[in-house]
Image (cartoon, rainbow, N blue to C red):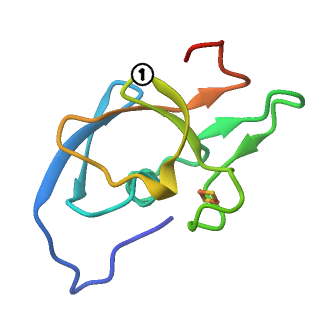
Amino acid sequence: MFRRLPDAAGDTITFTIDGRRAQAFAGDSVAAALLLAGVEHCRTTPVSGKPRAPYCLMGVCFDCLVTIDGVGSRQACLVPVREGMSVETQQGKREAGR
Ligand code: FES
Protein backbone atom coordinates (compact mmCIF):
# COMPACT_ATOMS: atom_id res chain seq x y z
CA MET A 1 0.00 0.00 0.00
CA PHE A 2 1.30 3.41 -0.96
CA ARG A 3 0.96 6.45 1.31
CA ARG A 4 1.96 10.06 1.03
CA LEU A 5 4.74 11.41 3.15
CA PRO A 6 3.23 12.94 6.29
CA ASP A 7 4.22 16.51 5.38
CA ALA A 8 2.97 16.36 1.76
CA ALA A 9 0.52 19.11 0.85
CA GLY A 10 -1.29 20.33 -2.22
CA ASP A 11 -4.58 21.39 -3.73
CA THR A 12 -6.99 18.45 -3.71
CA ILE A 13 -8.71 17.53 -6.97
CA THR A 14 -11.38 14.94 -7.72
CA PHE A 15 -11.33 12.49 -10.63
CA THR A 16 -12.75 9.02 -11.33
CA ILE A 17 -11.18 5.59 -11.57
CA ASP A 18 -13.46 3.10 -13.35
CA GLY A 19 -16.37 5.34 -12.39
CA ARG A 20 -15.43 5.61 -8.70
CA ARG A 21 -14.62 9.04 -7.28
CA ALA A 22 -11.05 9.48 -6.12
CA GLN A 23 -8.90 12.35 -4.90
CA ALA A 24 -5.33 13.38 -5.59
CA PHE A 25 -3.15 16.44 -5.30
CA ALA A 26 -2.82 18.74 -8.28
CA GLY A 27 0.45 17.84 -9.96
CA ASP A 28 0.30 14.13 -9.11
CA SER A 29 0.74 11.84 -12.07
CA VAL A 30 -2.19 9.58 -12.89
CA ALA A 31 0.01 6.60 -11.94
CA ALA A 32 0.77 8.05 -8.50
CA ALA A 33 -2.90 8.86 -8.00
CA LEU A 34 -3.88 5.28 -8.90
CA LEU A 35 -1.34 3.80 -6.49
CA LEU A 36 -2.42 6.15 -3.71
CA ALA A 37 -6.06 5.18 -4.36
CA GLY A 38 -5.17 1.52 -3.79
CA VAL A 39 -5.48 0.35 -7.40
CA GLU A 40 -3.43 -2.86 -7.49
CA HIS A 41 -3.11 -3.11 -11.27
CA CYS A 42 -3.99 -0.71 -14.03
CA ARG A 43 -4.07 -3.11 -16.98
CA THR A 44 -3.87 -6.73 -18.02
CA THR A 45 -1.65 -7.93 -20.84
CA PRO A 46 -3.28 -8.65 -24.23
CA VAL A 47 -1.69 -12.12 -24.55
CA SER A 48 -1.62 -13.74 -21.11
CA GLY A 49 -4.09 -11.55 -19.22
CA LYS A 50 -1.54 -11.06 -16.42
CA PRO A 51 -1.98 -7.93 -14.29
CA ARG A 52 0.44 -5.03 -14.62
CA ALA A 53 0.98 -1.96 -12.45
CA PRO A 54 3.13 1.15 -12.73
CA TYR A 55 6.77 0.10 -12.35
CA CYS A 56 9.35 2.58 -13.56
CA LEU A 57 7.24 5.75 -13.13
CA MET A 58 9.35 7.49 -15.79
CA GLY A 59 7.91 6.45 -19.15
CA VAL A 60 10.10 3.44 -19.91
CA CYS A 61 8.25 0.21 -19.05
CA PHE A 62 4.72 0.87 -20.42
CA ASP A 63 3.21 -1.16 -17.58
CA CYS A 64 1.05 1.80 -16.56
CA LEU A 65 -1.19 2.00 -19.66
CA VAL A 66 -4.72 3.21 -18.93
CA THR A 67 -7.58 4.88 -20.75
CA ILE A 68 -7.77 8.60 -19.94
CA ASP A 69 -10.86 10.56 -20.95
CA GLY A 70 -11.68 7.88 -23.54
CA VAL A 71 -8.20 7.68 -25.10
CA GLY A 72 -6.65 4.25 -24.59
CA SER A 73 -3.07 3.17 -23.90
CA ARG A 74 -1.94 6.41 -22.25
CA GLN A 75 1.10 6.17 -20.00
CA ALA A 76 -0.30 7.05 -16.60
CA CYS A 77 3.10 8.01 -15.22
CA LEU A 78 3.53 10.78 -17.80
CA VAL A 79 0.12 12.43 -17.49
CA PRO A 80 -0.74 14.81 -14.63
CA VAL A 81 -4.12 14.09 -13.09
CA ARG A 82 -6.70 16.84 -13.63
CA GLU A 83 -9.97 17.84 -12.01
CA GLY A 84 -12.82 15.78 -13.49
CA MET A 85 -10.53 13.41 -15.39
CA SER A 86 -11.92 9.95 -16.19
CA VAL A 87 -9.38 7.13 -15.80
CA GLU A 88 -10.26 3.56 -16.76
CA THR A 89 -8.11 0.51 -16.21
CA GLN A 90 -7.45 -1.54 -19.34
CA GLN A 91 -8.29 -5.20 -19.68
CA GLY A 92 -6.38 -6.81 -22.55
CA LYS A 93 -5.90 -5.04 -25.84
CA ARG A 94 -7.67 -1.85 -26.90
CA GLU A 95 -9.90 -1.70 -29.92
CA ALA A 96 -8.75 0.38 -32.90
CA GLY A 97 -9.52 4.03 -32.40
CA ARG A 98 -9.59 3.80 -28.63
S1 FES B 1 5.33 3.23 -15.05
FE1 FES B 1 6.76 2.67 -16.57
S2 FES B 1 6.09 3.71 -18.35
FE2 FES B 1 4.73 4.37 -16.79
x then y, percent, for residue 88: 46, 29
Q: Secondary structure at mark 1?
A: loop
In what quadrant does ligand 1 lie? bottom right
Q: Is residue 95 above or below residue 17?
A: above
Which residue, as the protein is rendered here, is positioned at the far front? 97
Tell me what residue is drawn at x 37 percent, y 55 percent.
Answer: 33
> Quick one: label 1, few (<14), some, or many (20+) residues within 10 Å?
some
Q: Is residue 24 above or below residue 68?
A: below
Tell me what residue is drawn at x 42 percent, y 22 percent.
Answer: 70
Which residue, as the protein is rendered here, is positioned at the far left? 11
Residue 66, quarter of picture = top right
Which residue, as the protein is rendered here, is positioned at the far top? 96
x then y, percent, for residue 57: 56, 66
Describe residue 20's horizontal placement relative to residue 30 as left or right.
Answer: left
**Quarter of the picture holding the C terminus:** top right
Describe residue 35's horizontal placement relative to residue 15 as left or right.
Answer: right
x then y, percent, for residue 59: 60, 61
Which residue, as the protein is rendered here, is positioned at the far bottom? 7
Tell me what residue is drawn at x 14 percent, y 70 percent.
Answer: 10
Is the residue marked 1 within 8 Å of ligand 1, measured from its CB?
A: no
Q: Is residue 18 above or below residue 52?
A: above
Question: Which residue is nearer to you in this view: 89 or 94?
Answer: 94
| Kind of residue indicated by mark 1 | Gly
Residue 16, quarter of picture = top left
Numbered disc total: 1
Residue bearing mark 1: 70
Question: Which residue is nearer to you in this view: 3 or 70?
Answer: 70
